[in-house]
Amino acid sequence: MFDKVLIANRGEIALRIQRACRELGIATVAVHSTADENAMHVRLADESVCIGPPAATESYLNIPALITACEITGADAVHPGYGFLSENARFADILDDHNIAFIGPSADHIRTMGDKIEAKRTVAALGIPVVPGSEGGVSDPDEARAIAAGIGYPVLVKAASGGGGRGMKVAKTESDLEEAMQTASREAAAAFGDGTIYIEKFLGRPRHIEIQVLSDGKGNAVHLGERDCSLQRRHQKVWEEALSPALNSEQRETIGNTVAKAVAEMRYEGVGTVEFLYENGEFYFIEMNTRLQVEHPVTEMITGLDLVQEQIRVASGAELLYSQEDIVFSGHAIECRINAENAETFVPSPGTVVSLHQPGGLGVRVDSAIYQGYTVPPYYDSLIGKLIVFGKSRQECLMRLRRCLGEYVIEGIETTIPLFQRLVSDPDILNGDYDIHWLEEYLDN
Ligand code: ADP
């Protein structure tokens, strides 16, 4: 096991990882920018190192500063959290060169899954269902027309190195196709330095359902069920739940086992999430995230496993402690992402938290790094906390969530709590009847 883990992140996830380390008896090193000197993850760490000015490119993304911080403190492993360097294969390689463990999969797996065409090819070969489309990149308009005609319109033109919903264009008919290709390619070249595009069937009203896996790189893997993350705004998840109101246990077992078998065969190491669009009873792979996800707590609530501790164990070379029969799903969990933003305009609202009361009680978990008197800096993601609620049934979970949202007080900054207060009483939400477009349509009305 590791002696000392440096956590290359900030905010709630840095604290979350610290907690896992402390329970495992591992010392922690926090890193921070000058804007985060008074942050909770710094206050609670065993040691801390300032790695640069506020801009993330000069601090949380500054690889030389992070390596130096490891060397100064003698950290033998780095946990990247999510975002920042968590899916940066070069960072994993550089750590390896310095004999520091990267708590995550191999650089090769990060690289493969970071290229959407390569990822799709790899998982399809392992039996995971993918969206019908081109075999690889397409640049010739005639070839594109033939492929699109074969799968049927509408089609989606996507960038191989896309992310955050950029470099994606829908072509409703053949007459839109060439322009969609040009726009997507141009956008992708500008944003990612790679204009390679491919074509997929466009799914009209799917749900976003993702499978959580845990794998030890030695041929053992389990799936930890799914999360339904269909409630999104601008491709950002807002509300996540486990299990999905749309799946039955047979569907869960089938897709879960397919994914677990695939990652075991890949010799994938650590936690990972295989994301699907789900429509009319069929799953279509969209991408694999080779890291811990923001929404991992809902899975922890229904399985009782600490995903971060499992991730650290596997990274230190241990075999999985569980086989699939040991994984038992119980109850229902929902996570609301609380952002420092206006709940109607979504304009960020940094500033000082002058008063704070967080909900509690049975089945309630708040993952957050804010405190009374804390100033939310304007430089980073606006997520300031996650409210995760568990219930024996989905109905109990929703009732408890409504109670918690009524108790939650954050004053001094605006938050998205009022949005969740509305959502938790909406009939479609209560019925679990929503798809990936539901929230944007709701917000437009
Ligand atoms: P990114 O990496 O940019 O987030 P994804 O491939 O994960 O790209 O897709 C982002 C979102 O775009 C999905 O959550 C879904 O809303 C939409 N999307 C992607 N592929 C399709 C598709 N084939 N049909 C319909 N919508 C899609």
Image (cartoon, rainbow, N blue to C red):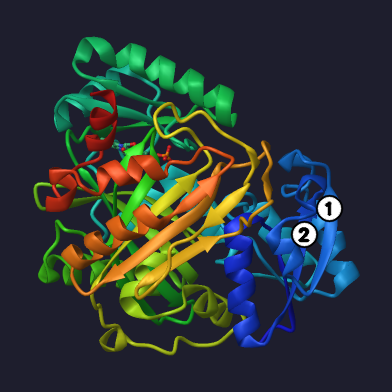
Residue 276 is marked as none
Assess disc 2: are there few (<14), some (14-19) or many (≥20) residues with their C-alpha within 10 Å of its C-alpha. Answer: many
Is residue 442 placed above or below 373 in the rendered structure?
above
Labels 2 and 1 touching (C-beta < 8 A): yes
Q: Label 1: state its secondary structure.
A: strand
Residue assigned mark 2: 31
124 sits to left or right of 315:
left
Residue 98, picture quadrant: bottom right
Residue 231, picture quadrant: top left
Q: Residue at x 58, y 61 (%)?
A: 13
In the foreground, 218 or 416: 416
Q: Residue at x 27, y 24 (%)?
A: 444
In the foreground, 436 or 139: 436
Is residue 238 placed above or below 241 in the rendered structure?
above
Amino acid type, callout 2: Val
Q: Earlier in the sequence, mark 2 or mark 1?
A: 2
Amino acid type, callout 1: Ile
250 sits to left or right of 129:
left
**Residue farthest toward the right in the current orientation of the protein:** 72
Where is residue 236 drawn, in percent x and y?
A: 41, 40
- Ligand 1 shows up in which quadrant of the image? top left
Name the quarter where the N terminus is drawn.
Answer: bottom right
Is residue 250 placed above or below 341 in the rendered structure?
below
Count of marks, rendered view: 2
Assess disc 1: are there few (<14), some (14-19) or many (≥20) residues with their C-alpha within 10 Å of its C-alpha. Answer: many
Q: Would you say residue 103 is visible in this rendering?
A: no
Where is residue 291 drawn, in percent x and y?
A: 51, 60
Q: Label 2: state its secondary structure.
A: strand
Residue 51 is marked as 1
In the foreground, 111 or 140: 111
Find the distance from the CA under tag 2 to the CA under tag 1.
6 Å
Where is residue 141 drawn, in percent x and y?
A: 33, 17
